[in-house]
Image (spheres, rainbow, N blue to C red):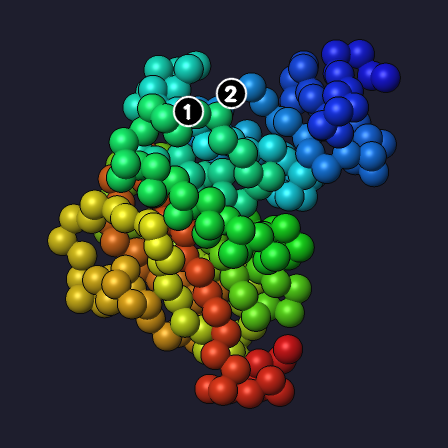
Amino acid sequence: MPCGTGWTPRTRRWRSKVAGRADWGAIAHTQRVWTSDNTAAVDRLCIQGQAWHVLSPEVTGCHISASLNWLDKRETSLDFRAAIVLFGHLGLELDPLHLDAGERDQLRQWVALHKRLRPVLHAGVALFGEDSATRVNRGVTRHDGGTGIYLVAQRDWPSVRLPAPACLPGLAPKTRYRVTVPAPQHIQTRRPSAVQETLLREGLVMDGAILSEVGVFLPQMPPQSALVPECQALWRDMGNDDAGI
């Protein structure tokens, strides 16, 4: 057993105790790698992003933590904390009894969303968009490009008034997609355009080439907020042959 690591047979989880190291030889015998005891949502953006370069999202343990977080004492919204960890091996690190009725219902909806998206999140292709100093952009697509699920997370205020559009990689260029922001997501935006309001309310239909290469202008997002856009192919619009799928 490598120095500084521990094996927990009951849960079949490989725990990394030093420097986030995980023995690849253990992956064949476990369903989960716990990347860090740091569950602060802002820090998890970096921790999980680095881990997903070498580990599949489905084996990286990701917990919805409490607010205030036990480590950094930072208060963040439930939507932000849930969106950050939605893509991994989801767990809860909070006491639902300490939530009010609205928050418990919100948490229930996030867990239901994870279960609905899990067949793609845990069997797809992990992709990384263009990050900036203030924004993180990554996602998972089906192998055939038929579905894409993305995380666009705002760490801090952008350095420019109008942030660049968020490119959603891995989609079939000749396929048309319906882009939605599935419930229970709710974000406070500043003066969204009519198109952005439509995206948040009912979704937009866009070509895969536009989404991947040009991107979609998302509403201006405040620090420590996130959106999870879902892209579903509209087969009837283009046909399987044109979609290249």
Residue 39: percent from the left, percent from the top? 48, 24
Question: What amino acid is found at the position of numbered circle 2 in the picture?
Answer: Asn
**Marks 1 and 2, how far apart in space?**
17 Å
In the rendered view, would you say 176 is above or below 229? below
Q: Which residue is mark 2?
A: 38
Residue 13, quarter of the rendered image? top right
Residue 159: percent from the left, percent from the top? 27, 39
Label 1–label 2 contact, CB within 8 A: no
Question: What amino acid is found at the position of numbered circle 1 in the picture?
Answer: Asp
- Is 124 left or right of 187, judged from the image as shown? right
Q: Nearer the viewer, residue 160 or 236?
A: 236
Q: Is residue 75 visible?
A: yes
Q: Which residue is mark 1?
A: 95
Which of the two discs, 1 and 2, sits closer to the camera?
1
Residue 5, quarter of the rendered image? top right
Residue 238: percent from the left, percent from the top? 50, 86
Q: Residue furthest top?
A: 3
Residue 224: percent from the left, percent from the top? 32, 34
Q: Is residue 152 visible?
A: no
Q: Earlier in the sequence, mark 1 or mark 2?
A: 2
Please name the residue shown 35% across and 54% down the image: 183
The disc label shown at residue 19, or none: none
Please name the residue shown 65% across and 22% down the image: 20
* Crowd band around label 2 with a 10 angstrom C-alpha radius: few (<14), some (14–19), many (20+): some
Please name the residue shown 39% across and 66% down the image: 179
Q: Nearer the viewer, residue 177 or 94?
A: 94
